[in-house]
Amino acid sequence: MIDYEKTKAWRSDPVRHSYTERDTILYALGVGFAADPLALEELRFVYEKELQAVPTMAAVLASPGFWMRDRKELGIDYLKLVHGEQGVTIHSPLPASGTLIGESRVTRIVDKGEGKGATMHVEKTLTDEATGRPIATSEMVLFLRGDGGFSKNGGGDEPAPAAPATPDAVPEVTIEMPTRADAAVLYRLSGDINPLHIDPAVAAKAGFPRPILHGLATYGNACRGILARFCGHDASRMKSIRARLTSPVYPGETLVLDCWRLGSEEIAFRASVKERGVQVLANGRAVLAA
């Protein structure tokens, strides 16, 4: 069972991550940019001439790895862990290449009850090594399906404020975005090499008919759609983006991104798979520069 005090006190060592323009281009390809190589506006994300980084790449840079598995004294049942929500706040445009320092910590652990699991919030700050400038803050919310009921031994935090509801109205904008058949093969080169996303035998053992796309790749695809429709492909206009990851996508399926304007600087969104009618992102919010 999870040890609340030890887990809440967990801090990563500083993670130094040097990356190149090639890494930035690989990430952009993995979230669907330049599927049409003649889409000139998308070349800004895959061509070293005036290259800009996709803001959601902050979620994968300078991360501490699968520490929940390696720190057995914390008692986390990592085999039943699910990535449930992701947010990124950009403080300064993400450099197309450079060296960042990432520092991660647990900020909240909520007991949902015996047999109901727990949620854990992990925050990561990214700082530019050369300048000391804050670049981004990333938060992932993990659903610990095997760790409910830990508070009977003491500890536990109040739940985070509820995610904002999806507007009860017809979407103002709907964007269809086909995903690449090789999307997971490309995206894993940005750091998540879990065989679930490439090995058919592993996927079958996990109950899937074929390898699934990474949840963070689906999240990155939503960022791509919002940058295209609302930001003129200007990555510097994306200030934050957050969403719940609700269901997997199979590479090659078509994402349907529904969006609502909430004033001039906020977009609500959700995403589903056209072929199966399954919602894959919920409670999405993006904040843009005016």
Image (cartoon, rainbow, N blue to C red):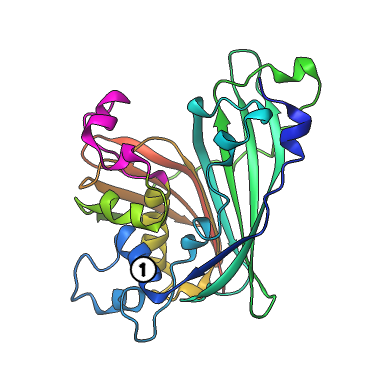
Q: Quadrant of residue 99?
A: bottom right
Asked whether 162 or 24 is in front, the reply is: 24
Residue 207 shown in magenta: yes
Q: Position of residue 247 (x, y in %)?
A: 38, 35
| Residue that protrudes farthest toward the right in the picture | 154
- Specify the quadrant that holds the C terminus: bottom right
Residue tagged by mark 1?
228
Report the magenta residues as a range: 194-215
Asked whether 243 or 212 is in front, the reply is: 212
Q: Measuring 69% from the left and 29% from the top, which residue is drawn there? A: 110
- Specify the quadrant that holds the N terminus: top right
| Residue that protrudes farthest toward the bottom in the picture | 49
Q: Quadrant of residue 117?
A: top right
Q: Is residue 147 above or below residue 25?
A: above
**Label 1 element class:** helix
The kind of residue on which mark 1 rests is: Ala
Q: Is residue 202 above or below residue 270?
A: above
Q: Position of residue 141 (x, y in %)?
A: 58, 40
Q: Measuring 72% from the left and 42% from the top, which residue is drawn there? A: 10
Counting every numbered tag in the picture gives: 1
Horizontal arrangement in the rendering, residue 33 relative to residue 242 (left or right): left
Q: Measuring 35% from the left and 70% from the top, which residue is drawn there? A: 25
Horizontal arrangement in the rendering, residue 206 relative to residue 153 (left or right): left
**Residue 184 in view, yes or no:** yes
Horizontal arrangement in the rendering, residue 163 relative to residue 37 (left or right): right
Q: Position of residue 101 (x, y in %)?
A: 63, 65
Residue 45 shown in magenta: no
Q: Position of residue 23 (x, y in %)?
A: 39, 68
Q: Is residue 185 above or below residue 58?
A: above
